[in-house]
Amino acid sequence: MTAATGVAGLRVRIDPRLRARRAAVRRDAGRRRLHRLLLGAGVVATLTVAAAVAWSPLLAVHTIVVRGAGADRAAVRAAARVRTGQPMLLVNAGGVAAAVRRLPTVASARVERDFPNTVTITVSRRVPVAWAPAGPGRAAVLDRHGDVLAVGPWPPAGLPELAGLTRVPGPGGRLHAPAAAAAAALGPSLRGRVTTVVALPGGLVALVANGPQIRFGDGTQLAAKAEAAAAVLAALVAPARYIDVSVPNAPVSG
């Protein structure tokens, strides 16, 4: 019994260097836990402050500027769906621009967030060059590519008719209309005088009010052909039935 007690009562002596090492390890572990705790608290505090600033009036939309839209300004603002008071950081510039570009009259759109409080929407509009019948009492306005910009109850003044088209779509649709490019090429002196442009088997033809046909031939070099036609039309001293500018540097009238 005494021997057992003696064995149980033995104390193992630990090297002081090992004891100091263990204490240092415990201190290092405690410092690492404290560092992680402080870092986590700092991240939370930073995110809280950032969220508060982002949702505060300091970084909210106060002004929406629309440039280049003309008569479509209200439609652009409605399509953009940006509202005053909305956090600037939540304005998706790319998404807003894509929504505005879906308007039939808009060719391109760019959206800029001008911090702290302004959103600027800059658009370029499609240019109407002609119109086409779109049913009884209806006229579709087209751009140079044949895109339908609008459909209204009457033909717009100052634009030629594109004849011979069928199944004209609604706004946003596109027609295969080579004559639209010819209508777009008409210069100022021709635009007010040409009443109709039509694509015939022999080529593109424009009809001048109280004047001759203008025969463009194919759809190449349309600007040069229109310029040549305007020059010949201005120089005519006797009535002519046609002006052929299919070869623009050698026009013929007859």
Image (cartoon, rainbow, N blue to C red):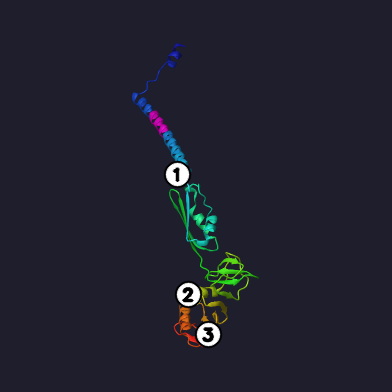
Specify whether 40 is left or right of 131: left
Measured in 3D between alpha carbons, the distance from the residue under mark 1 to the one under mark 3, in whole angstroms, is 68 Å
Mark 1, other Cα within 10 Å: few <14 / some 14–19 / many ≥20: some
Q: Indicate the amino acid at tag 2.
A: Pro
Residue 43 at least partly seen: yes
- Image coords of residue 65 (percent x, y): 47, 55
Residue 174 vs residue 34, the one in the foreground: 174
226 vs 128: above or below: below
Q: Are marks 3 and 2 in contact (CB under 8 Å)?
A: no
In the picture shown, does residue 127 fall above or below 57? below
> Which label was assigned to residue 188?
2
Dominant secondary structure, magenta:
helix
- Using the numbered discs, state the Cα–Cα distance from disc 3 to disc 2 in whole angstroms: 20 Å
Highlighted magenta segment, given as a residue range: 25-35
Q: Is residue 211 left or right of residue 39?
A: right
Residue drawn where x is 53% and y is 57% of the image: 74
Helix or strand or loop: what does disc 3 sit on? Answer: strand
Q: Position of residue 18 (x, y in %)?
A: 36, 26
- For the residues carrying marks 3 and 2, which lies nearer the camera in this image? 2
Q: Is residue 29 a member of the stretch shown in magenta?
A: yes
Q: Earlier in the sequence, mark 1 or mark 2?
A: 1
Q: Earlier in the sequence, mark 3 or mark 2?
A: 2
Query: Label for residue 58?
Result: 1
Marks 1, 2: nearer the viewer: 2
Queried whether the magenta region covers residue 236, the answer comes back as no
- Residue 48 in percent (x, y) is at 46, 39
Is residue 187 at least partly visible in the picture?
Answer: no
| N-terminal label among 1 and 3 | 1
Query: Distance from label 1 to label 2 (Cα)?
Result: 50 Å
Residue 77 place in picture, x, y as percent: 52, 55
Please name the amino acid that badge 1 sits on: Leu
- Tag 3: Cα neighbours inside 10 Å, few (<14), some, or many (≥20)? many
